[in-house]
Amino acid sequence: MKVVIDSNVVVSAMLSPHAPPAQVIRLALQGDIGLFHDDRIVAEYRDVLSRPKFGFDAEDVRSVLEGIEWIGETVFARPLPVELSDPDDLPFLEVAAAAGADAVVTGNTRHYRPVKGQHDVRVLAPRELLDLLAESR
């Protein structure tokens, strides 16, 4: 399975190291699932993870980001004729579509319902992805 991971999953993984988002990040960093990103996504990860409100250790953030960049495959995505309620989510959708990813993994699946236009990218919560992976084994 190959996915694009929303920044809220990365934040949740760092906040709760045993919860489903952390399990998804571990699977990606171990190479058990494929990971796609682009420069916009990596920049958002960096921005969000460095926010003082989270208080993440800078070395932990650096380590996670290096792992994501190293393991993940960089994709050059084209704009999609879709409008989402949160425009910041559009890069994740565009990368998933361009890469032919199996899904976008997010803690906010409703944010990916189009306000205008349509897309055919599957959107899964972390637990849904883990359940699918368990079923396929």
Image (tube, helix red, strand yellow):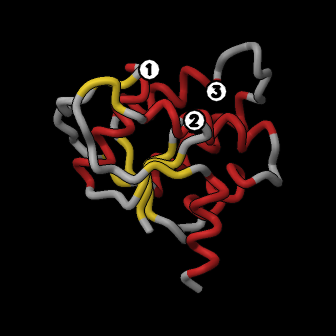
Residue neighbourhood size for the residue with mark 3, other residues' Cα within 10 Å, grouped as few (<14), some (14–19), many (≥20): many
Viewer-side label of 3, 1: 1
Residue visible at 72% across and 54% down in the picture:
20
Q: Residue furthest bottom?
A: 137
At numbered mark 2, what does the secondary structure look like: helix, strand or loop? loop
Q: Position of residue 65 (x, y in %)?
A: 56, 40
Whether tag 1 and tag 2 are in contact, CB under 8 A, the answer is yes
Residue 108 is labelled as: 2
Instruction: Classify 26 as above or below 89.
Output: below
- Tell which of 59 and 83 is nearer to you: 83
Residue 86 is labelled as: 1
Residue visible at 35% across and 54% down in the picture:
73
Q: What is the CA distance from the residue labelled 3 to the residue labelled 1?
A: 19 Å
Q: Residue furthest top?
A: 52
Q: What is the CA distance from the residue labelled 2 to the residue labelled 3?
A: 17 Å
Residue visible at 43% across and 35% down in the picture:
112
On-image quarter of the N terminus = bottom left
Q: Position of residue 82 (x, y in %)?
A: 24, 29
Q: Position of residue 136 (x, y in %)?
A: 54, 82
Residue neighbourhood size for the residue with mark 1, other residues' Cα within 10 Å, grouped as few (<14), some (14–19), many (≥20): few
User: Which three-letter amino acid code belongs to the residue tagged 1?
Assistant: Asp
User: Which three-letter amino acid code belongs to the residue tagged 2?
Assistant: Asn
Q: Is residue 12 left or right of residue 46?
A: right
Where does label 3 land, which residue?
49
Viewer-side label of 2, 3: 2
Count of labels in the image: 3
